[in-house]
Amino acid sequence: MTPRDLVLTKRGLRFMGRQFPCTIGRTGLTSDKTEGDGATPRGTHSLVGCLYRPDRLAKPCDWAVPIRPADLWSDDPRDEDYNLMVRAPYPHSHERLSRADPMYDIVLITNWNWPYAERGKGSAIFLHQWRRPHAPTAGCVAFARRDLIWIAGKITHQTRLIIR
């Protein structure tokens, strides 16, 4: 573990000597993640991507990729594109990345069950903006907007998300 790792603690997320309030999945932590269980998976996860809404905020880091209106994330374990970014029109179950609310204005993508997804083991563990303080997620880790933007600007390719 290094100061550049994002470490989930009982008091929030520790990163670069700072502590950030955050929320996790509505059913807590799990060592046996399944699709739709509402849990945040324990483990050490790499950060493999950053997405952002260019119509709502400036590019948060050099490697951020803009979210376009047709961008989706497949969460259908029966589909070959399960746990991958796809584009509309898309006939299978998915999450829209270009949302009306600000929750996905910036998204850090972890390598949970990616890039070669095991069907049913859960999709899309993101770090994203919370709906409101202390509101649980569907399994992701969520933050205040300003904190997430600050974190995105400081992470490197070596940064890991550590959830025990």
Image (cartoon, grey):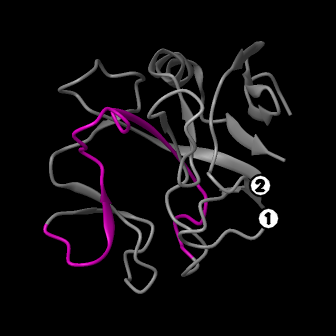
CB of mark 1 within 8 Å of CB of mark 2?
yes
Which residues are the magenta region?
89-117
**Amino acid, disc 1:** Ser
Q: Quadrant of the N terminus?
A: top right
Judge by depth and name the residue closer to the eye, 46 or 40. Answer: 40
What crowding class fits label 1: few (fewer than 14 Cα within 10 Å), some (14-19), or many (20 or more)?
few
Residue 98 on the magenta segment = yes
- What is the CA distance from the residue labelled 1 to the residue labelled 2? 5 Å
Q: Residue at x 42, y 86 (%)?
A: 78
| Tag of residue 31 | 1
Judge by depth and name the residue closer to the eye, 112 or 93. Answer: 93
Q: Main secondary structure of the magenta part?
A: loop
Judge by depth and name the residue closer to the eye, 157 or 122. Answer: 122
Residue 85 on the magenta segment = no
- Residue 158, given in percent of the width and then of the height, sits at 67, 35
In the picture, measured across the screen, residue 97 lies left or right of residue 24, that is left
**Amino acid, disc 2:** Arg
When asked about the image quadrant of residue 11, the answer is top right
